[in-house]
Amino acid sequence: MKRLSWLALCLVLVFGLLFVIGVQAKKPKKDFRFVIIPKVVHPWFDLVHQGAEAQAKLLSEQTGCKFRIDYRAPSKADVVMQNMILEQAAATRPDGIAIDLLDADGNRAVLQEIINQGIPVVIFDSEPPEGMGLTSIGNDFAEQAAIASERLVELLGGKGKVAIMQGVPTAPNHRIRYEAHKAVFAKYPGTAHPDLKGFVSCDAAGPIGIGLAIKEAGKTGKVLSVGLDNLNQLLALIKEGVVESSSSTKPEMQGAWSVMALWMQALGQPTPKKIDTGILIITKDSLK
């Protein structure tokens, strides 16, 4: 009888211990740190950072957990430097990493190492390496470029020499936009010659440089530019009539949804293959 009582007591203690361990294992995490790695130091990525910080603040207020953003921008657009920053970030064991790829092939091996460590990874403003199954946050880059190109063709009446500012050739989003621009212009043979009449771009910096060059050359209204994105300097050029319009991404939204996707993955929840943040058409009239 004593033996049975002792056995019963042991079973109670074991199940009690398992219950305590189970409760501890399910204890909600109260502190999240997400790393954001852009292509390079640039005002456009500052907007992404702002969006991520705003989302982290909102989640902290609404959940009672602490959300922190660790922003690490390469000083130059170099895939070796970006991979080094990626490895350094992973070594700190963050709850997730969001990165804008400089070179999908060049980044692949390091990304795979980090995924193998169990660290959630999402891609923003870019396309993920093929076959890796990573969530990407951003707009349809081909659609964005086609909108700008078709608008420029319409402004030019279907003819006049045009130029494409390519950006970083290895960057997936820049490459996709470049090919989409070319595809549109290929439909209009009259855009190949004679004098230069219009510009489109594949990144956020291009239309600002183009606009300043048009302004300095006194070619406002003679050479047309349909830009990309929504940086303040570009918006000022649109207001002045130097740049006609812009086909813009939504960088703040990309930062915000990067945080949301990483949070869901950190909780063990699945996330969509693609989170489309949309395209905004900016004109002089829309800025009034």
Image: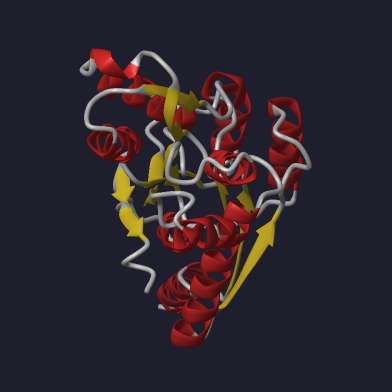
Please identify the quarter of the rendering in which residue 286 is found: bottom left
Judging depth in this view, the residue of 265 and 251 nearest the camera is 251
Judging depth in this view, the residue of 96 and 165 nearest the camera is 165
Q: Is residue 223 left or right of residue 232?
A: left
**Is 101 situated above or below 260?**
above
Residue 40 visible to the viewer: yes
Residue at left offset 34%, top offset 23%:
160
Judging depth in this view, the residue of 257 and 121 nearest the camera is 257
Visual colour scheme: secondary structure
Please identify the quarter of the rendering in which residue 84 is found: top right
**Is 251 situated above or below 58?**
above
Residue at left offset 48%, top offset 80%:
58
**Is 277 situated above or below 80?**
below
Judging depth in this view, the residue of 165 and 96 nearest the camera is 165
Quarter of the figure that contains the C terminus: bottom left
State how many labels appear. Answer: 0
**Is 57 situated above or below 33?**
below
Residue at left offset 40%, top offset 60%:
264
Q: Position of residue 43 (x, y in %)?
A: 64, 55
Quarter of the figure that contains the N terminus: bottom left
Residue 130 visible to the viewer: no
Q: Position of residue 209 (x, y in %)?
A: 61, 41
Q: Position of residue 11 (x, y in %)?
A: 43, 71
